[in-house]
Amino acid sequence: MDSDTATSTIREKSALLVGFVALAAAVLIARGSPPESYELSIYAGTPLAFWVGTGAALVLAVIVGLGGGGRRRRLGLVLGGASTFAIVALPVIRSYYFFGAGDSLTHLGWAKDILAGRLSIVDFLYPGTHTVSVFLAEATGIPITRAMLLTVTAFTAVFLVFVPLATWTITRDPDATALAAFAGLLLLPINHISVAQMAHPTSQAIMFAPLVIYLLARYLTDADRDSLLVGTPTGALLAVASLAILLVHPQQAANVIVVFAIVLGLQLLARVVGTREREHSLLAAQTVFLVGAFLLWAPRHERASGATAALIDMLLNGPDVGAEVGQRAVSLSAVGGSIELLFAKLFLVSLVFCVLAGLVTLVGVFDRLEDPDAGAFARYLGLALGPLLLLFAAYFVVSYATLHFRQLGFIMLVATILGAIALGRGLDALSTRASGGTARAVVGVGFLVMLALSVPIVFQSPHIHQSSRHVTEAQMSGYEASFEHGAAEGFIGVRGSGERWADAVLGVEESRDRSALTRTSLYASERHPATGENFTGSYLASHYSDRYLTFTDRARQQEVSVYEELRFDESGFESLETTPRLDRVRANGDVQTYLVNATN
């Protein structure tokens, strides 16, 4: 027996050594391969050796993290977390200039406004991500673009660390904690519709939320009994974390309020029925504090009050059930995809955890979990899913600003923790019917399959019918030069008007003051939509006059390679070069600018 134990220990140590060496080599290889131009897929652009190294590290992490013991198990969990962190940090490791087209460009503009003193954080609805980025840029002297990349990566690190810590605080079960660590590696909140691995405050708020859940669990179980003048140190930290998530994004703070309210309601009910919740610290003061802070902060900002009013109006006067889903289904079908396959890629693993969360909630409601604290938290978090899902349904019915998928991101955070608790109980049950090694092997294989499905959707790529959100310095400088020299005529884009680029280059405040600068796009124009057979140089020269057409190489690759020429074909792009009265006035490889109806 001692010989078998010694052999197992040597194998686990060897596996850890190989795993950490493979990961280190993978990171060094990725670091040595910065992008030369825009990359349509970060997966294809990153050397294959990186994926081999991180893949090997993840496999070994699962083997040791589930099958090892003591310190070796903890190192296995660290190896798994570090491997996933290396993947999410690829834009930083490979020295991307910026990552996050669309919304992220506007957030970059707001960060520039704060840095330049044009925007006060007290006048901004969600200054958290931007303020951290500005502080980092000011403290280190790095560009604000890189500071935002580091900030996004840091928020994801919070998620990876505190999902297992929250589960440990709830269960005190090493198996459930290990399973939670690997569940966190799946990054289930990311859905690429409204939650993504880029500068996007609601995404960062969701990644920050496990810290709030961890402190909530610590506070409720009274792990910190040393009192301050008011409350406990854990209570003070929970209040600070609650305020922080409010400043990162109020929508996710509202979701935290829902969780707090359910916890408080169950605690008050427990005073009557005598369940475990009555033994936990009462959450009344923390709930009142967060609700008060929310009411003081959110309504004073027009962006929040306007969104709330619009949502209520849509619910009352004109629901458009699943409009966006229907539109996407038609487009996917046209490029040879299907909504069913895309759903499987994005949400199959999430669906598994939703089922697990539902099961453990039912077990908790009927008080069948052996650990009373785990049962109480199964009720807390499981029953909180009810109102959270109702909000998801309301957002979905009106299809308002993809808020339903932001809501889904927070729901999947809760499902991740509950699913890990369920897997822990399932592992115990399976171990009674088979050997412990067999049970861990089955669960380990399951996690490896789920990791294989989840890693390819950490970033946008053609795998999910999207192009990478990679932003190059040449793209930014190209738009900057175009805006500097073409302000009088104004700009049009291919799918987007160029407003996001104006936000990023000029700052949002100046961009909005010069809104005529970016007028419309060929896709969105109601009078002369230049799509399909109308996307030719001659059509543009006939219907668009005295303005600049500017687009990136990303836009061209996206339309031709990802969307398979659905709206804009390669021949249309080529015709821009040969059409009279349509002159290319600027090009740097990543950005093309044409003056339409130019005087020759």
Image (cartoon, rainbow, N blue to C red):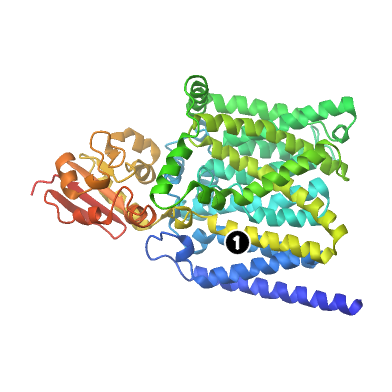
Give amino acid for label 1.
Answer: Ala
Task: Indicate the quadrant containing the N terminus: top left, top right, bottom left or bottom right.
Answer: bottom right
Name which residue lies at 50% across and 29% down.
Answer: 398
Residue 31: x and y in percent read 50, 68
Horizontally, residue 115 falls left or right of residue 219, namely left
Viewer-nearest residue: 230 or 325: 325
Q: Is residue 79 above or below residue 165?
A: below
Image quadrant in which you'd find residue 246: top right
Residue 354: x and y in percent read 67, 44
Name which residue lies at 86% across and 59% down.
Answer: 433
Residue 224 appears anywhere in the view = no
Q: Is residue 569 above or below residue 5?
A: above
Which secondary structure, mark 1? helix
Residue 462 appears anywhere in the view = yes
Horizontally, residue 19 falls left or right of residue 403, namely right
Image quadrant in which you'd find residue 50: bottom right
Residue bearing the label numbered 1: 452
Tell me the crowding category of disc 1: few under 14, some 14 to 19, or many 20 or more residues within 10 angstroms, Cα based.
Answer: few
Residue 382: x and y in percent read 74, 38
Residue 363: x and y in percent read 81, 41
Q: Is residue 372 above or below residue 1?
A: above
